[in-house]
Image (spheres, rainbow, N blue to C red):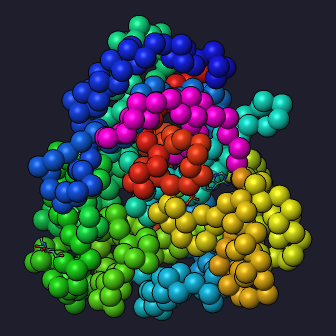
């Protein structure tokens, strides 16, 4: 199937160059935008967010499988977040060696001790997959990770379908252009935020986007803000230090920042150690967690999204704990796990396996944000260096997913126009609002396809490695 759809491989150079210009202009027209690196806090200079010239063929059955399993993942993460014993057990060994996770966990424990102030929970997540290709050519959906905090590109990916449709039409591929699905995660994400805001129940209170220092990807977030303003829901953008300086709780634990009551805190920051530059930053996180503002995610859901939890879920019997009477759901979720995820902690057998065939594995530290994973010979070096020390429990070892490479052109500012062997990663957005015991919303909000050159084993769009793409269903 892939080869048949690689029609553009035969297109001549002049046509490709023309199409690339058309594609970039269309991306600008559609608002697939990013600020430029050199001026990340000003919209005076913007460019198109990097994207592929052509959409990537994805088998329809596997795509639909990813959409179908999403609401179960929503339920799973939510149940984990409400199971303190499970979180404690799952993270115990990580906390011993990983300061960052330990600090998050301490906030979690303090909140549990005080009692959660807010019973409304808002989840905006993205579950990421790659399509593993077996030796017989069959393709299966394998989960890379689940993101419960700051999952990005829901905004921009709402605008890329039209860009690829346009390119295909200009290339004379009308039939193919019809195989690109509509996709609008931005409105789905906004719908969930709006629901949480309504349940909070104060018209003057704002949705606060907690944003990074460098705001290169601001347009991705602006789409969601725009949707909220259309519903007459006020939004504000604040950094950690704005919250440190001007944030406070009143006697009812209502959160005020810069004089404004905050109904929902939407974290687009706070998932990496580097985001916490000082003790004041940690204090600000704690302040927000203690408040009655709805947190997206709250601290327990943040922890439920850690890689360690992903690993523990892959152990026999663990999914059953969360779906005791639903073997069908367990099976559906387990089908997307990429082989047993091993912990260095779990004995030398798995390590021996990795040392013997490092190219079959990915070694992951307990980190988010791209560029942290370890591959190939480096795996041996790291595992051997950590031999016998507790540091090894800071890593999880995962079977490497082996997708088929597809050729494409990656369009990025200042990048050369050349054909690359590419690998893709499919993300599916899940949204979820719970009020006490009532699940008031649990939806699949759309998808994201990211594609990178196969030379890079790691890294996302923000890291400058992957680019935005669309699935072309086959
Ligand atoms: N099991 C795997 N097999 C193949 N590639 C992987 C695997 N796990 C991660 N990767 C690659 O590494 C990248 C980053 O890993 P990920 O688990 O998503 O961590 P992060 O939180 O940094 O995004 C992924 O986008 C993917 O390209
Ligand atoms: C997203 O987060 C919410 C809680 O914030 C969680 O309940 C939900 O299961 C998550 N969904 C996915 C797909 O991770
Ligand atoms: C937030 O803090 C930054 C400094 O990090 C400051 O420049 C900015 O004016 C503050 N913004 C608001 C709206 O308070
Ligand atoms: Mg990732």
Picture quadrant where residue 194 is located = bottom left
Q: Nearer the viewer, residue 451 or 441?
A: 451
Picture quadrant where residue 281 is located = bottom left
Query: Residue 411, position in %: x, y?
Result: 38, 35
Residue 158, compared with residue 82, is above or below; it is above
Query: Residue 413, position in %: x, y?
Result: 31, 40
Q: Nearer the viewer, residue 381 or 51?
A: 381
Which quarter of the figure is the C terminus placed in? Answer: top right
Which quarter of the figure is the N terminus placed in? Answer: top right
Is 250 included in the stretch rendered in magenta? no
Residue 411, compared with residue 189, is above or below; it is above
Q: Is residue 256 left or right of residue 428?
A: left
Is 415 included in the stretch rendered in magenta? yes
Query: Residue 72, position in %: x, y?
Result: 60, 51
Residue at image position (87%, 69%) is 352
Picture quadrant where residue 64 is located = top right
Query: Residue 401, position in %: x, y?
Result: 70, 48
Residue 87, compared with residue 435, is above or below; it is below
Residue at image position (67%, 60%) is 375
Q: Is residue 187 left or right of residue 471?
A: left
Residue at image position (44%, 35%) is 410
Whereabouts is ligand 3, in terms of quadrant?
bottom left
Visible residue check, residue 317: no
Residue at image position (63%, 44%) is 130
The magenta-colored residue range is 401-428
Q: Nearer the viewer, residue 232 or 382?
A: 382
Residue 388, compared with residue 404, is above or below; it is below
């Amino acid at each position: 199937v892939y080869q048949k759809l690689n029609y553009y491989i035969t297109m001549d150079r002049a046509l490709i160059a023309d199409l690339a210009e058309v594609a970039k202009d269309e991306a600008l027209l559609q608002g697939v935008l990013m600020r430029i690196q050199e001026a990340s806090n000003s919209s005076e200079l913007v460019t198109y967010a990097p994207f592929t010239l052509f959409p990537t063929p994805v088998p329809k059955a596997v795509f639909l499988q990813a959409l179908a399993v999403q609401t179960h993942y929503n339920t799973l993460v939510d149940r984990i977040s409400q199971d303190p014993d499970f979180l404690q057990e799952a993270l115990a060994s990580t906390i011993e060696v990983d300061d960052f996770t330990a600090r998050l966990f301490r906030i979690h424990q303090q909140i549990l001790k005080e009692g959660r102030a807010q019973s409304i929970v808002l989840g905006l997540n993205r579950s990421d997959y790659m399509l593993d290709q077996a030796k017989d050519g069959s393709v299966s959906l394998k989960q890379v990770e689940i993101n419960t905090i700051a999952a990005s590109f829901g905004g921009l990916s709402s605008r890329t379908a039209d860009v690829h449709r346009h390119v295909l039409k200009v290339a004379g591929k009308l039939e193919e252009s019809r195989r690109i699905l509509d996709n609008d995660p931005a409105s789905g994400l906004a719908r969930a935020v709006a629901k949480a805001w309504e349940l909070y129940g104060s018209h003057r209170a704002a949705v606060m986007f907690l944003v990074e220092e460098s705001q290169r990807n601001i347009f991705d977030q602006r789409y969601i803000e725009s949707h909220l303003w259309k519903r007459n829901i006020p939004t504000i953008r604040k950094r950690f230090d704005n919250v440190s300086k001007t944030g406070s709780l009143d006697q009812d634990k209502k959160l005020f920042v810069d004089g404004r009551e905050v109904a929902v805190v939407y974290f687009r920051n706070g998932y990496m150690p580097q985001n916490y530059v000082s003790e004041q930053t940690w204090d600000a996180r704690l302040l927000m967690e203690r408040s009655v503002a709805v947190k997206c995610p709250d601290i327990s859901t943040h922890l439920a999204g850690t890689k360690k939890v992903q690993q523990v879920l892959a152990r026999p019997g663990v999914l059953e704990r969360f779906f005791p009477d639903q073997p069908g759901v367990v099976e559906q979720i387990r089908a997307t796990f990429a082989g047993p995820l091993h912990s260095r902690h779990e004995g030398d057998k798995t390590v021996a396996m990795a040392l013997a065939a490092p190219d079959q594995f990915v070694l992951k530290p307990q980190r988010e944000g791209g560029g942290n994973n370890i591959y190939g010979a480096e795996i041996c070096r790291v595992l051997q260096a950590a031999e016998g020390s507790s540091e090894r429990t800071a890593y999880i070892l995962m079977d490497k997913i082996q997708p088929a490479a597809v050729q494409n052109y990656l369009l990025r500012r200042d990048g050369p126009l050349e054909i690359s062997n590419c690998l893709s990663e499919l993300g599916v957005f899940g949204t979820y609002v719970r009020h006490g015991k009532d699940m008031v919303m649990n939806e699949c909000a759309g998808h994201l396809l990211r594609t990178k050159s196969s030379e890079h084993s790691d890294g996302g769009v923000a890291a400058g490695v992957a680019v935005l793409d669309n699935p072309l269903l086959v």
